């Protein structure tokens, strides 16, 4: 059972839905993590350790990490109904925006404004990721063993080792080298909180969701229509791919460009750019692909296929993890995963910097975003709003960003 403090902080479904819609509307890429922290921890829906537990957990199974974490946060806060509504409204803004952009692109081909906006957004995301990296470093790289795991993860990412293998190695190193967090750190109540809702109701919801999971596979294999092939194609990627959008992107390219010829390479590159400038998960590019194949219906099928496996996995793993997280090896493995995530975050930071920080002006965006979020505690909504307005102004007046 929850303690009284946790019960008083549990949000209504209406408040949770509105909050996750706001995150989906305003957060970009890895900056979603900062928004989730500010919302869930700031409103005391979950503790920092609970959210960090979720961050470690969601890296252990396939799917886009930030979507997995958002679903976990909603599930841990309000049970199945919270996860269903929270994950839906989290994707809704980026889905609608991508449908509009896809219509403009395939109808008129007007994308010249995307590049300067993309550079400004990437620069601001770089600054915010720098803040997140420092924050996680102070927490998970403060011991020699933690720094070793994080540094090794960073090096493996440099050599393009699959994120899945990095996580597996981090689990073993965590068990072998890292201490049990319970032995050295003060508890914050994370072991008290339970997933809301009766267990029987949650299990029934998982069974129904699982039936839908296998029905999609069967339908994709049986029917020869393009819509069925599209659904199964995106579903396969969402069901087996680990990591962030950048690590899943090659699989997306293989399906959309090489195997099915739904897009040309130029169209695929433009779709990736649109996925970057729209808020929410980067893999909303699936919507762009689906729109090309089957219009509005195709965009909905592709988006559903990409993210539904992650939703299903999160429900299952959250239930299992809740039963075994008290075990010492599990807690040590989690510490290893979080240390490795910090190292991978450094790799993401350098990769973003290489793309976005190509001239003095983007550095102003990046440093400004870093200072605003770390020291001024400014909400990301305002950071991106100001940055987007300034970048559009620069474009209109012919100021080159890169």
Image (cartoon, helix red, strand yellow):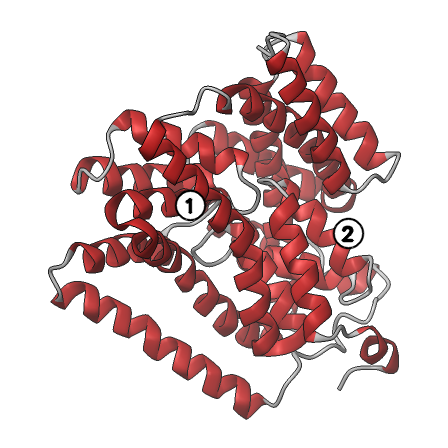
Q: Quadrant of residue 83?
A: bottom right
**Image position, residue 68 (x, y; %):** 53, 58
Q: Quadrant of residue 163?
A: top left
**368 in relation to 41, above or below:** above
Query: What residue appears at the point 63 percent right and 86 percent down from the top-left corner?
Result: 197
Q: Is 399 placed left or right of 113 in the picture?
A: right
Residue neighbourhood size for the residue with mark 2, other residues' Cα within 10 Å, grouped as few (<14), some (14–19), many (≥20)? some
**Mark 1 or 2, nearer chain start:** 2
Q: Is 80 placed left or right of 136 in the picture?
A: left
Q: Can see residue 332?
A: no
**Image position, residue 215 (x, y; %):** 26, 74
Residue neighbourhood size for the residue with mark 1, other residues' Cα within 10 Å, grouped as few (<14), some (14–19), many (≥20)? many
Element carrying mark 2: helix
- Which numbered mark, 1 or 2, is in the foreground of this view? 1
The residue where tag 1 is placed is 99
Element carrying mark 1: helix
Name, please, the residue furthest toward the front.
Answer: 108
Residue closer to the observer: 1 or 155: 1
How many labels, in total? Answer: 2
**Image position, residue 225 (x, y; %):** 14, 59
Query: What residue appears at the point 32 percent right and 46 percent down from the top-left corner?
Result: 291
Query: What residue appears at the point 43 percent right and 56 percent down from the top-left corner?
Result: 62
**How many angstroms separate mark 1 from mark 2 (CA)?**
29 Å
Q: Can see residue 35?
A: yes
Residue 38 bears which disc, if any? 2
Q: Is 139 placed left or right of 391 in the picture?
A: right
Pointers 1 and 2 in contact (CB under 8 A)? no
Residue closer to the observer: 301 or 151: 301
**Image position, residue 1 (x, y; %):** 75, 86
Q: Quadrant of residue 396?
A: top right
Residue 259 bears which disc, if any? none
Residue closer to the observer: 255 or 195: 255
């Amino acid at each position: 059972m929850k303690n009284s403090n946790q019960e008083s902080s549990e949000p209504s479904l209406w408040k949770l839905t509105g909050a996750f819609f706001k995150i989906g509307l305003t957060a970009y890429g890895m900056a979603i993590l900062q928004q989730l922290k500010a919302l869930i921890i700031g409103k005391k829906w979950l503790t920092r350790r609970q959210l960090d537990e979720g961050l470690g957990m969601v890296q252990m199974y396939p799917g886009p990490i930030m979507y997995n974490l958002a679903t976990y946060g909603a599930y841990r806060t309000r049970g199945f109904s919270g996860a269903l509504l929270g994950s839906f409204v989290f994707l809704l803004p980026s889905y609608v925006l991508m449908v509009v952009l896809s219509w403009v692109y395939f109808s008129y081909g007007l994308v010249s404004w995307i590049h300067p906006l993309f550079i400004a957004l990437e620069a601001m995301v770089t600054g915010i990721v720098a803040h997140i990296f420092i924050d996680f470093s102070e927490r998970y790289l403060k011991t020699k063993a933690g720094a070793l795991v994080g540094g090794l993860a960073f090096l493996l990412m440099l050599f393009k080792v699959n994120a899945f293998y990095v996580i597996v190695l981090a689990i073993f190193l965590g068990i072998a080298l890292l201490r049990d967090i319970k032995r050295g750190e003060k508890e914050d109540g994370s072991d008290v909180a339970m997933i809301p809702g009766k267990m029987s109701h949650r299990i029934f919801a998982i069974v129904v969701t699982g039936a839908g999971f296998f029905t999609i596979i069967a339908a994709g294999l049986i029917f020869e229509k393009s819509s069925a092939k599209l659904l199964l194609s995106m579903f396969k990627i969402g069901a087996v791919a680990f990591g962030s959008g950048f690590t899943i992107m090659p699989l997306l390219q293989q399906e959309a460009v090489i195997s099915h010829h739904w897009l040309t390479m130029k169209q695929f590159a433009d779709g990736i750019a649109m996925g970057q400038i729209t808020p929410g998960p980067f893999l909303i590019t699936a919507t762009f692909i689906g729109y090309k194949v089957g219009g509005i219906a195709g965009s909905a099928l592709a988006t559903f296929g990409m993210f539904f496996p992650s939703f299903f996995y999160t429900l299952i793993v959250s239930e299992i993890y809740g039963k075994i997280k008290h075990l010492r090896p599990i807690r040590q493995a989690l510490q290893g995963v979080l240390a490795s995530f910090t190292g991978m975050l450094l790799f993401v930071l350098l990769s973003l910097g290489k793309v976005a920080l190509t001239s003095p002006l983007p550095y102003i965006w990046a440093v400004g975003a870093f200072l605003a979020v770390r020291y001024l505690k400014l909400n990301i909504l305002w950071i991106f709003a100001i940055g987007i307005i300034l970048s559009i102004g620069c474009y209109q007046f012919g100021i080159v960003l890169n």
